[in-house]
Image (cartoon, helix red, strand yellow):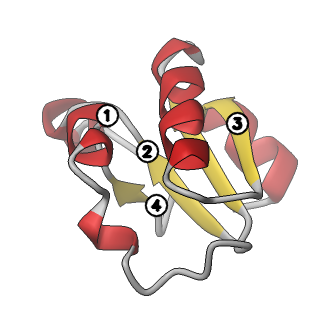
């Protein structure tokens, strides 16, 4: 499972899920180079502050060929649901 925080770096620095990658939507739209070695069927959990940006990010990732993408909504929900 790969957890992706799609908020801006300044937001990420204020707190994030332990082990999460910080990949804002603009970087995702540029091809998400940080995910180059991640298999297309790997479970990806994306989150932001309210679920809006992560919903957009989820669609971008699906267009890039990732088949197992979930909108985790926000940090608190991801931590509670996935125990991270």
Q: Image quadrant of residue 2?
A: bottom right
Q: Front-most of 9 and 29? A: 29
Relative vertical location of residue 32 with respect to residue 61 in this rendering, above or below: below
Secondary structure of residue under mark 3: strand
Whether residue 61 is visible to the viewer of this picture, yes or no, is yes
| Mark 3 or mark 2, earlier in chain | 2
- Checking the image for residue 72, the label placed there is 3
What residue did someone put label 1 on? 25
What residue did someone put label 4 on? 20
| Mark 3 or mark 1, earlier in chain | 1
Secondary structure of residue under mark 4: loop
- Checking the image for residue 73, the label placed there is none
Q: Label 4 near label 2: C-beta < 8 Å?
A: yes
Relative vertical location of residue 35 with respect to residue 56 in this rendering, above or below: below
Relative vertical location of residue 71 with respect to residue 66 in this rendering, above or below: above
Q: Label 2 near label 1: C-beta < 8 Å?
A: no
Circle nearer the viewer, 4 or 1: 1
């Amino acid at each position: 499972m790969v957890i992706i925080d799609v908020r801006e770096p300044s937001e990420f620095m204020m707190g994030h899920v332990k082990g999460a990658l910080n990949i804002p939507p603009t970087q995702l739209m540029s091809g998400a180079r940080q995910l180059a070695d991640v298999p297309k069927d790997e479970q990806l959990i994306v989150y932001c502050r309210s679920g809006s940006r992560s919903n957009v990010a989820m669609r971008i990732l699906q267009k890039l060929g990732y088949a197992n993408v979930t909108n985790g909504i926000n940090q608190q929900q991801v931590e509670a649901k996935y125990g991270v």
